[in-house]
Every structure is written in C-alpha cells, then in structure tokens.
Image: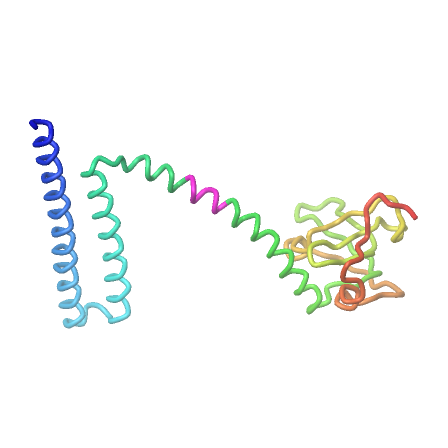
Amino acid sequence: MQVDMDQVVTLAWQAGAVALIVGVGFLGFYIIRRSLERMVEGGLLSQSFFRIVKSSIRWLLIIAVIAACLQQMGIKIANILAVLFTIAGMIAVGFIAVWSVLSNILCSVLLIIFRNFDIGDEIEIVEPVGGPGLKGRVVGFNIMFTILAESGGGVDAAMLTQIPNNIFFQKTLRRIPGQKTEGLGQHLLARPIKTVKCNDSE
C-alpha cells in the first residue's frame, strides 16, 4: 500500500509540475503579446513584423513547454533530440539525392529552351582554373545526361561520356556548330526511349 501511495504522490507531483509549466508558458506568451501590441500602438512596430514575431515566439514557447514537460515526466530530451537529428539527417540525404535528379531534369528543359548546343555540335567544357577540358561532339541527349563523343569520334565510337545536364550551367561552354545538327527537343521527342550506350560498338 505504501508503494501505491508513493506512486500516487509522484504522479500528482508530476501532474502539478506539468500544469504549472503550461500555465507559466501561457502567462509568458500573454505578457509578451501584450507588450508587442503596445509597441504596435505606439508606432514602434509594424503589423507585419508584429505577426512574424508573435508567431515565432508562440512556437518557441510551445517547443520549450513540451520539452520541459517531457523532462519533468522523466523522458530524456537528449534521446529525443538524437532521434530527431537522425531523422533530419536521413531526410537531408534523401533531399540532396532527389534534388540532384530534379536539378538535371530542370537543366535539360533549360538546355532545350535556350539551345546552348544541338546534336552534332562540337563543344568543350572549360575548367574554371584553366587547362584542357572535356571536348567532343554531342551525339545523344536525355532528361538526365548529354552523351559526348571524343573529337573525331561518332555515335559508334568506343569511348562515350555521359555528362550530367546541370554541369553545363556550372562551367563555361565553347561551341562549334556542326554541319548537320538536330535540336535537343526534337531529338528527345523522336527518341523518348532509345539512348546511346557507352562502350558499345555495332
């Protein structure tokens, strides 16, 4: 019976502490909001800035109250933060991977719109620090990559290079128009599935 009474007292103490924390949080938000409203009435703050500050303070207080309540209930905040940071890290890695794909797709659309080069053109990607860059003839294009054959090669050349489309918006590009060319959009629509395979001779 003594053990049960101890548990009841502990639960009552925790409930009271949680109620006190929540009450202090509400009171603190009310005082801060009233102070901000008086500053708005006095012309010290604009309405838009007041709404931003009020919303930020409200969410910060909510997070602080939840953290304090969990701590009072015996839940270690460090463990929760570790889990949250782990989840955030996984989301960040996934976002970076997805963003890389989306970046190439968007850049392929921009290449079609601005016609930086056509199929059959000779192009050279110039390195910012100087020195020889990747150079060759454009022989293929899709929503992710541009296929480049070395100068003097062709579609059936043994060495073909797939360049991510976003590279063309990060480095300087030299272009020599080819004698027989095809627009990137026309090439993509005419061959929606067919792609140029590397290291493949017919």
Question: Would residue 20 be found to the left or right of residue 197 on screen?
Answer: left
Is 18 in front, or is 151?
Answer: 18
Is 155 in front, or is 2?
Answer: 2
Is 55 in front, or is 80?
Answer: 80
Tell me where residue 71 appears, x and y as whole percent.
Answer: 22, 38
In the displayed orientation, state which residue is furthest to the right: 202
Picture quadrant where residue 85 is located:
top left
Picture quadrant where residue 89 is located:
top left
In the displayed orientation, state which residue is furthest to the top: 2
In the displayed orientation, state which residue is furthest to the front: 1
Task: Indicate yes or no whether the magenta region holds residue 29.
Answer: no
Tell me where residue 116 appears, x and y as whole percent.
Answer: 73, 64
Question: Would residue 1 be found to the left or right of residue 56 on screen?
Answer: left
Question: Would residue 49 be found to the left or right of residue 193 on screen?
Answer: left
- Residue under the point 20% across and 43% down: 69
- Residue under the point 15% across and 56% down: 26
Q: Is residue 176 above or below residue 83?
A: below
Span highlighted in magenta in the image: 86-92
Tell me where residue 40 appears, x and y as whole percent.
Answer: 18, 70
Give the position of the N terminus as an image quadrant: top left
Q: Is residue 172 above or below residue 5?
A: below
